[in-house]
Amino acid sequence: MLAQFVVDSHFRSQPKGANMDDKAFSESQEETRASAGLAADSKILSQDLLRKYLTYAKLNIFPRFHEKDMAKLTKVYADLRKESSRGQGVPIAVRHIESMIRMSEAHARMHLRQHVTEEDVDMAIRVLLESFISTQKFGVQKALRKSFRQYITFKKDYHGLLLALLRELVNNALRFEEILSGSARRLSYVDVKVADLQAKAEEYEISNLEAFFSSTEFKAFYELDEQRQVIRHHLADNDKPQV
């Protein structure tokens, strides 16, 4: 949500974005809130309270590591150094383990914890791995993702990715209807097969969609027909292609 707010604010401050009307800006915010699973009346943290929270954390919270957590970081670093050297990819450096340490401490501080927990360490490892692996050649990326899958999938929220994949399938269905009948404006809804979404999801090693179908993000825009195994998206006028 913070990222969306910053991007929208930046866009509005530019000459090309100065004409972005309030309605469009409001709709953008509502879509962000819906994607985050927030109700319309949910409370948003005020900037003043956020400023106080950050100040308190900086002045009073200084997380310390347990030996076992530091040992875990060291092991991941050693394993990653060994694996990355095999595929002639970008080598890992000491600065990477230093980054994991700082991210672990930052994550603990964000939760006002005086000790770094395993959750903090696992989150730091996941962020570092995703960043580091993305810099490698495709073949090296695939091998590294397989070797470090247990860390990469830690507390990862795939709902945003699945929403994007589902939106792509809906758009493909609309384009197909346009080619077939010349226009898709007469449609009031689009159905997408669950099997099609499952196939797309498996490309990203996502095998279980039950949590996604039960999520607020999914229910805000789609309906699941379990008997027919289809996902229905009701179309608003602005969803339909222009003729």
Image: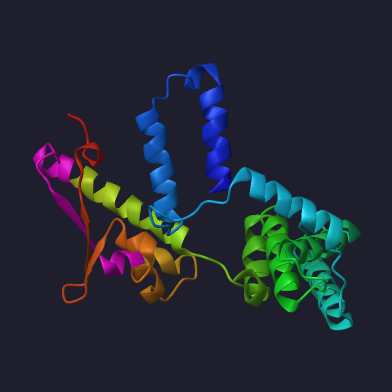
Quarter of the C terminus within the rendering: top left
* Residue 99 image point, x, y percent: 82, 58
- Which sits in the foreground, 98 or 236? 236
Residue lying at 58% horizontally and 71% vertically, measured from the top left: 155
The image quadrant that residue 6 belongs to is top right
Report whether 83 appears left or right of 47. right
Residue lying at 17% horizontally and 40% vertically, measured from the top left: 178
* Colour basis: rainbow
* 122 vs 166: above or below: below
- Which sits in the foreground, 111 or 196? 111
- Tally of numbered discs: 0
The image quadrant that residue 232 belongs to is bottom left
Residue lying at 21% horizontally and 39% vertically, measured from the top left: 240
Q: Is residue 53 visible?
A: yes
Q: State yes or no: residue 193 in magenta.
A: yes
* Residue sticking out furthest to the bottom: 68
- Which sits in the foreground, 138 or 175? 175
Where are the magenta residues, as a range? 177-197
- Which sits in the foreground, 121 or 12? 12
Report whether 115 appears left or right of 129. right
* Residue 179 image point, x, y percent: 17, 41
* Residue 183 image point, x, y percent: 13, 37
